[in-house]
Amino acid sequence: MNHVNQSPGPMNNRYLIFLSVCISLALMCSCDEKVKLREEIDITGFWEGEYNIHGRSDIDPQYMNLLVKKDGTITNEAQWFNGVRINLGTWELNGNAFKYQVSNVVGGENPNPLIGTATLDPSGKLIDGIWQNLSGSNSGTFEMVKRK
């Protein structure tokens, strides 16, 4: 009985190298795609939507705009019954949790601080928004989409 040394030949080594390269490329491409999806949703820019006031179902939804700036500041313009209020403040995004705090500069009582929180969903909308007037009892909900 002859025993032949069965060391991998050059063909087997090339196959293993080829297979390793293919697996590495597949992993890199899948990771790259996940990063691109997260980068596509940029919170900075112009957002518009509507908000509701808790306990005031007699009032139609009011319009609301946010201008979210890269420097961490935010401008909030909103309808308040038949008037307009403009608020300035700051924002932050932790993961998909968006939060802002503003004070009234035009219309209404000053400074009249407001806070708001929402979830940035994968489609690029701010959903499940909740706002609260810190110097009064008004609060409500909002939802927004980003305009390009």
Image: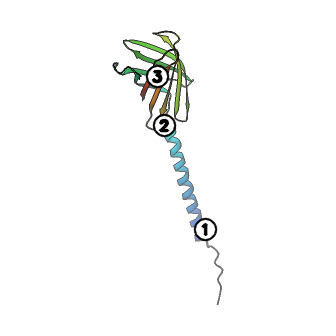
User: Residue type at mark 1?
Assistant: Asn
| Mark 1, other Cα within 10 Å: few <14 / some 14–19 / many ≥20 | few
Return the disc, 2 or 1, that comes first in the chain's sequence.
1
Name the spot of residue 1 as percent of width and height, x first.
Answer: 64, 90
x and y percentages locating residue 25 in the rendered image:
55, 54
Q: Amino acid at mark 2?
A: Glu
Snapshot colouring = rainbow
Q: CA distance from mark 2 to mark 1?
A: 41 Å
Question: In the image, what residue type sits under mark 3?
Answer: Leu
Residue found at x 55% / y 36% = 95
Q: Secondary structure at mark 2?
A: helix
Mark 3 and mark 1: Cα distance apart in space: 59 Å
The relative height of residue 59 versus residue 147 in the rendered view (above or below) is above
Picture quadrant of residue 123: top left
- Above or below residue 116? Residue 124 is below
Q: Which residue is mark 1?
A: 13
Q: Which labelled disc corresponds to residue 109? A: none
Which badge, 3 or 2, comes first in the chain's sequence?
Answer: 2
Residue 4 in view, yes or no: yes
Labels 2 and 1 touching (C-beta < 8 A): no
Please give the name of the residue rendered at 61% of the width and 73% of the height, measured from the top-left corner. 9
What residue is pinned by disc 2?
A: 40
Which residue, given by chain and number where applicable, does mark 3 sit on? 66
Nearest to N terminus: mark 3 or mark 1: 1
